[in-house]
Amino acid sequence: MWRFSISARVDPQTLPRLVAGFAQRAIVPHEMTMQIAGDTMRVDVAVSDLPPAQADIIAAKLRELFAVTAVVSAPCAAAVKPGQP
């Protein structure tokens, strides 16, 4: 599991552009959350079964997007929710 933490300026097109960065690679995020504080949007995305090289490419592409100010990607342990094996 990889987690991407993305900071960006608040703009109506920011979230669709971020999602498109994954969709263009046929990746469906496991989890995605978004919060706005002032003029900054923070988006956290968790993706399962992603090779490290592909995670680096995705992070680099996200950094190129309009309004994105920072992207941090890191491997993380997959959380197991109650009722899941």
Image (cartoon, rainbow, N blue to C red):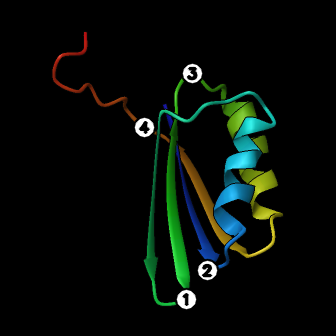
Q: Is residue 24 above or below residue 9?
A: above
Q: Nearer the viewer, mark 3 or mark 4?
A: 3
User: Where is residue 56 shown, x and y percent of the image?
Assistant: 72, 43
Report how far apart the C-alphas of labels 1 and 3 lie in the structure. Answer: 33 Å
Judged left or right of residue 38, residue 71 is right
Element carrying mark 3: loop
Which residue extends farthest top?
Answer: 85
Of mark 1 and mark 4, the one earlier in the sequence is 1
Q: Are the residues tagged 1 and 4 within 8 Å (C-beta)?
A: no
Give above or below for 55 relative to 26: below
Q: Residue at x 64, y 61 (%)?
A: 15
- Looking at the rendered structure, the number of numbered marks drawn on it comes to 4
Query: What residue sits right under mark 1 in the picture?
Result: 39
- Is the C-beta separation of discs 1 and 2 under 8 Å? yes
Look at mark 4 in the image and give the residue it sits on.
Answer: 76
| The quarter of the displayed image where residue 66 is located | bottom right
Disc 1 and disc 4: Cα gap in Å? 28 Å
Provide the residue designation for mark 3: 49
Question: Which dot, 2 or 3, sits closer to the camera?
Answer: 2
Q: Where residue 50 sits: x, y (%)?
A: 62, 26
Q: Which residue is mark 2?
A: 10
- Inspect the image, locate mark 1, and give the three-letter code of the amino acid beneath it: Asp
